[in-house]
Amino acid sequence: MENLILEAKKGNSDAFTRLMQSQLQNMYKAASAILNNDEDVADAISDTILTCWEKLRQLKNPAFFRTWMTRILINKCKDMLRKQSGFSLVEELPEQPVYDAKYENVEWKDALNALDEKHRLVMVLYYVEGFNTVEISEMLDMPESTVRSRLSRGREKLAKSYMGGRKYERA
């Protein structure tokens, strides 16, 4: 991936296209953790790709590309939520959804959707995307301790939801 990033930084549009295609599922999972419908997710991803192309030369260290790209995506999603100002449109099915078997597990997706955005986002970034707490804290511009507490509370809420309201006890 680093070679693609370096080539894309030089202006190679084919390398950039391959790079973005390799990140589509990651972007879809992160954006769908924040936004409510696939149309908005697609718009956020499109805006992110455009911004990445325009600003890729500003990326100093290619090793941080995914973190940098995900932060741009999160900001695009938050911008969309601010613009919507509390009203949402009727959800429509996407024309060509991105398929990822491990994320499409209905129970997992329903459980994540039951969480509020702040817990759902860190859970997806940590468990689905594989970012560590330091990377997530940088992406979301918050202390690492806040990320850890949101992960902990998110896990507790998921466990409580899964247990059907019964008391959850840690082992």
Image (cartoon, rainbow, N blue to C red):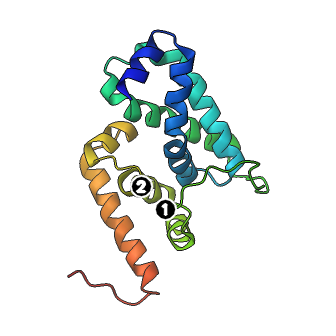
**Visible residue check, residue 75:** no
Amino acid on which the number 2 mark rests in the picture: Val
**Visible residue check, residue 13:** yes
Amino acid on which the number 1 mark rests in the picture: Lys
Residue 168 vs residue 9: left or right?
left
How far, Cα to Cα, is label 1 from label 2? 9 Å
User: In the drawing, what numbered circle is on residue 102?
Assistant: 1
Give the answer, above or below, for where 60 lies relative to 1. Answer: above
Between 3 and 27, the residue placed more toward the observer is 3
Give the answer, above or below, for where 122 lies relative to 3. Answer: below
In percent of width and height, residue 109 lies at: 54, 66
Residue 144 vs residue 23: left or right?
left
Quarter of the view holding residue 135: top left
Residue 94 vs residue 10: left or right?
right
Considering every residue shown, the one lying at the far left of the view is 171
Give the answer, above or below, for where 72 lies relative to 148. Answer: above
Q: Crowding near pointer 2: few (<14 within 10 Å), some, many (20+)?
A: some
Answer yes or no: do the residues labelled 1 and 2 have beta carbons within 8 Å?
Answer: yes
Q: Crowding near pointer 1: few (<14 within 10 Å), some, many (20+)?
A: few
User: In the drawing, what numbered circle is on residue 74?
Assistant: none
Considering every residue shown, the one lying at the far bottom of the view is 166
Quarter of the rendering occupied by the N terminus: top left
Between 56 and 9, the residue placed more toward the observer is 9
Between 45 and 160, the residue placed more toward the observer is 45
Quarter of the view holding residue 79: top right
User: In the drawing, what numbered circle is on residue 128?
Assistant: 2
In percent of width and height, residue 116 lies at: 50, 61
What element does badge 2 sit on? Answer: helix
Quarter of the rendering occupied by the C terminus: bottom left
Between 164 and 79, the residue placed more toward the observer is 164
**Residue at (30%, 64%) from the top-left corner?**
152
Give the answer, above or below, for where 91 lies relative to 67. Answer: below
